[in-house]
Image: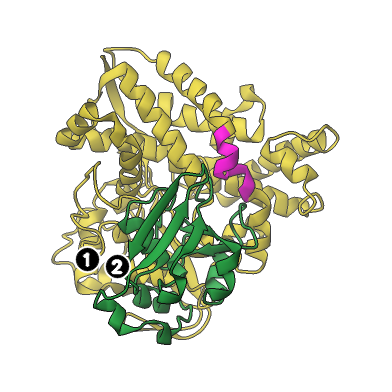
Amino acid sequence: MAVIASLASGDKLLLWQIDFLHFMGFVMVKILFIEHSGQEHPVEVAPGMSVMEAAINNAVPGIDADCGGFCSCATCHVFVNEQWLDKLPPLGSNEDAMLSLSPDRKENSRLSCQIPVVEALDGLVVTTPEFQF
Amino acid sequence: MTDATPQQSKWSMVGKDPQTIPIDQIDLSHPGIWHANEFLPFMARLRKEDPVHYCAESAVGPYWSVTKYKDIMEVDTSPHIYSSEPTIGIVDTFEEFTLPAFISMDPPKHDEQRRVVQGVVAPANLKNLERLIRSRVCGILDGLPLNEEFDWVERVSIELTTQMLATLFDFPFEDRAKLTFWSDVATAIPGGGIVTTQEERWQAIQECMAYFTKLWNARVNATPGNDLISMLAHGDATRNMPPMEYLGNVILLIVGGNDTTRNSISGGVLALNENPAEYDKLRNDLGLIPNMVSEIIRWQTPLAYMRRTAKVDTVLNNKQIKAGDKVVMWYASGNRDEDAIANANSFLIDRPNARQHLSFGFGLHRCMGNRLAEMQLRIVWEEIMKRFSFVEVVGEPERVYSSFVKGYTKLPVVLHPL
């Protein structure tokens, strides 16, 4: 789903990152979502989905994902903990354009629908903004 | 204000059988079926039989109708193929009657101009406005008669959105009815009940220009305030904006913030009356209000479409579209697409994923005021439920004569106290 969504949005997803063994459920990846208030939401998900889907599937508050993962609403905005930034796929042009419309954008802003969950991101920490816009 | 029913045009679809009319003759652009509330079965047939449909002849010339959710999404998120210039209305505009505004611009200019004003309606700013909005909502609701028929559109929907605009612009409160008038004029079709000619429409827009120029001049010489005009007058990126662009964007904000929310306020009352089981769900669980607000916005779809113009030859759902063709995304249809939204033709206030609807559009032109609209509707319903057991619709609603603004000119109601 994440793969299809990302390709449909025009942003290149690195296909080699999708290791089909992960779909067998052998590996789980830990992601920590921190709300603006500081409230923490640790989740464990199988690779293959997006970070946005990891939040939605685990009822993590602070992510709306109005467009359902097509990089076209910017309501799954997250701030990525600095140490993880260089492990993410590069910012796509659609993602950059959508983020540029957010008044809350920072250097470490990303749209979580554009970050596929891969084993290399085990331990990822992201903070959700006070508001999605 | 649009009570006058225009004479039956040869282009009107009103009274025609949506199932048997030759499909190439279906024309969603004519306001007749929207005014008469007969548009749904025409859209349903297009979705099923010809989802990207070419209408070769209409009062507004040839155009494509895009009626499926996923195709609309594709058009809306491909600004490099489908341009918002020169206009997002189905009628081609005459340059002398058009003001520049970022809704009808492509990147990069769109992005630059939008960035300047979007902070005003960003959630962080709205948080400070909530108390004021609530007090104005309470003031309006407390002044309504009980057990007696009145027009909800005039007394609540128009009054509330007008007060809200006056607040955001810090517009002289006693003159606030002018805002509503200018908003109606900006989207009016000459002959549709508000103005009779383009010249008359243009005259009203010039009056609006003069008024806002006066406000600009006053604010630019005063201490910076939190209102929209002051922000534009003092903002680094906007203080040197050409006057026509300032006014174009002001009018865009007036229209965007006015009849859209107005018609969702009326549409929610109507939808709950037509779906009494949903009204009961609401009475039993006020926690459903935020979800219901999204469902009301989907169900109403206060702007029925947005138009794009193909920049290049392209293919959409197996149809060849040529550079220069008009492409109309019917949000009102995509929001009823059963392939994208489960039970799309049912109004369900506890619907899962209620936020996934097309009413705000998607991509770079996605509605900037969406959070303000949702907040206004949420507060309205929170305060209605504190006061009234039933906002009863007691007569037929009257609808706007437009295929763009999908809404109501009249909704007779009686209020029953708790």
> Which tag is nearer the camera, tag 2 or tag 1?
1
Residue sitting nearer the eye, B74 or A103 = A103
Specify the principal SS of the magenta part: helix
Q: Are marks 2 and 1 on the same chain?
A: yes
- Using the numbered discs, state the Cα–Cα distance from disc 2 to disc 1 in whole angstroms: 8 Å
Q: Colour of chain B?
A: yellow
Q: Which chain is green?
A: A
Q: Residue at x 52, y 74 (%)?
A: A88
Secondary structure found at label 1: loop
Residue matched to label 1: B339
Q: What residue span does the magenta drawing correspond to?
A: B118-127
Q: Amino acid at mark 2?
A: Lys
Q: Height in image: B131 above or below A90?
A: above
Q: Position of residue B348 (x, y in %)?
A: 22, 44
Given contact means CB atoms under 8 Å apart, are the residues at marks 2 and 1 in contact?
yes
Residue sitting nearer the eye, B235 or A27 = A27
Q: Position of residue B22 (x, y in %)?
A: 19, 72
Residue matched to label 2: B68
Q: Height in image: A80 above or below B270?
A: below
> Badge 1: how crowded within 10 Å, few (<14), some, or many (20+)?
few
